[in-house]
């Protein structure tokens, strides 16, 4: 797809903002200024930005997220100062400082919320998509989830329901290779896209760190959903730059794995 100069500059600025925000949190954690079990999004910026650039920054298009939600929040138009205050439990946070790092949300921009329970946010996106179809709007919902979430029953039920009713929802699987500390070959059978195909859902597997690949796949999926074509599934393979959470000793990762990223 073709981009204007302005679109590329805006996308780069968003990705740069997310990376610098996460690196600042990482440094803060290393200085022992703790703020809960933060799961950083560094390395996956292209996925959040490449998808959300095709969504309106309002409640008319929505996303749901995971425990690793900072990048999604910012890419959807959430205020960076509000999420920073939320992470540190300040009253000026997006949730009044009560939700913390794993429960950030801003309904004004269509960020329905993160969820610390693996796979639990996907049905929320389904509900938003059902509402859009029932009210005959052109709204689209995007459900972000990790490879661990892809094995949860709620996710399979959501995919089945989405296809049965041809709902305007896009499932985005952010696959960093690990379900917490367990490599995916020990937890996941089969190909993610083949699973989606089993429900009759169009799917594609891409390099999630390639902004252009993500943007193209997301545009096709979101356009399909907005035009009444039903759900889509995007499998994004991504690197895990930092540990599963800040403070994790990463004893499960092979020697030299991180330095190669």
Image (cartoon, rainbow, N blue to C red):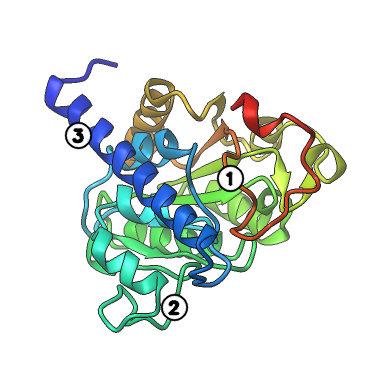
**Residue 106 in view in this figure:** no
Residue 195 x, y percent position in the rendering? 70, 37
Task: Identify the secondary structure beneath mark 1.
Answer: loop
**Most foreground residue, 244 or 145:** 244
- Marks 2 and 3 sit apart, C-alpha to C-alpha, by 29 Å
- Residue annotated with mark 3: 10
Closer to the chain start, of discs 3 and 1, is 3
Residue 112 x, y percent position in the rendering? 38, 65
Q: Identify the residue shown where x is 22% and y is 48%.
A: 56
**Residue 33 in view in this figure:** yes
- Residue annotated with mark 1: 242
Task: Identify the secondary structure beneath mark 2.
Answer: loop
Q: Identify the residue shown where x is 21% and y is 57%.
A: 58
Q: Say above or below: 3 vs 192.
A: above
Q: In which quarter of the image is the C terminus?
A: top right
Q: Say above or below: 167 vs 261.
A: below
Q: Say above or below: 23 vs 200.
A: below
Judge from the rendering whether residue 11 lies leftward or rightward of residue 51; answer left or right.
left
**Mark linked to residue 228:** none
Q: Are marks 3 and 1 in contact (CB under 8 Å)?
A: no
Judge from the rendering whether residue 29 lies leftward or rightward of residue 168; answer left or right.
right
Q: Identify the residue shown where x is 39% and y is 26%.
A: 211
């Amino acid at each position: 797809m073709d981009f204007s100069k302005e679109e590329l500059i805006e996308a780069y600025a968003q990705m740069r903002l997310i990376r610098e925000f996460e690196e600042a949190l990482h440094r803060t954690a290393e200085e022992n200024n703790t703020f809960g079990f933060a799961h950083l999004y560094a390395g996956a910026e292209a996925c959040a930005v490449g998808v959300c650039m095709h969504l309106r920054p309002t409640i008319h298009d929505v996303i749901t997220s995971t425990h690793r939600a900072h990048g999604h929040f910012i890419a959807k138009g959430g205020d960076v100062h509000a999420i920073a205050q939320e992470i540190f439990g300040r009253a000026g946070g997006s949730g009044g400082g009560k939700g913390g790092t794993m429960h950030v949300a801003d309904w004004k921009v269509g960020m329905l919320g993160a969820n610390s329970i693996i796979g639990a946010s996907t049905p929320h996106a389904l509900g938003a998509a059902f509402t859009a179809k029932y009210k005959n709007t052109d709204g689209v919902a995007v459900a972000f989830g990790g490879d661990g979430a892809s094995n949860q029953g709620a996710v399979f039920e959501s995919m089945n329901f989405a296809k049965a009713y041809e709902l305007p929802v896009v499932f985005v699987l952010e696959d960093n290779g690990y379900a917490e500390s367990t490599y995916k070959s020990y937890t996941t059978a089969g190909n993610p896209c083949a699973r989606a195909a089993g429900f009759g859902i169009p799917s594609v597997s891409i390099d999630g760190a390639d902004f252009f690949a993500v943007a193209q796949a997301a545009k096709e999926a979101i356009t399909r959903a907005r035009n009444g074509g039903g759900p889509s599934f995007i499998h994004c393979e991504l690197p895990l730059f930092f540990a599963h959470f800040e403070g994790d000793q990463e004893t499960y990762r092979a020697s030299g794995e991180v330095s190669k990223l």
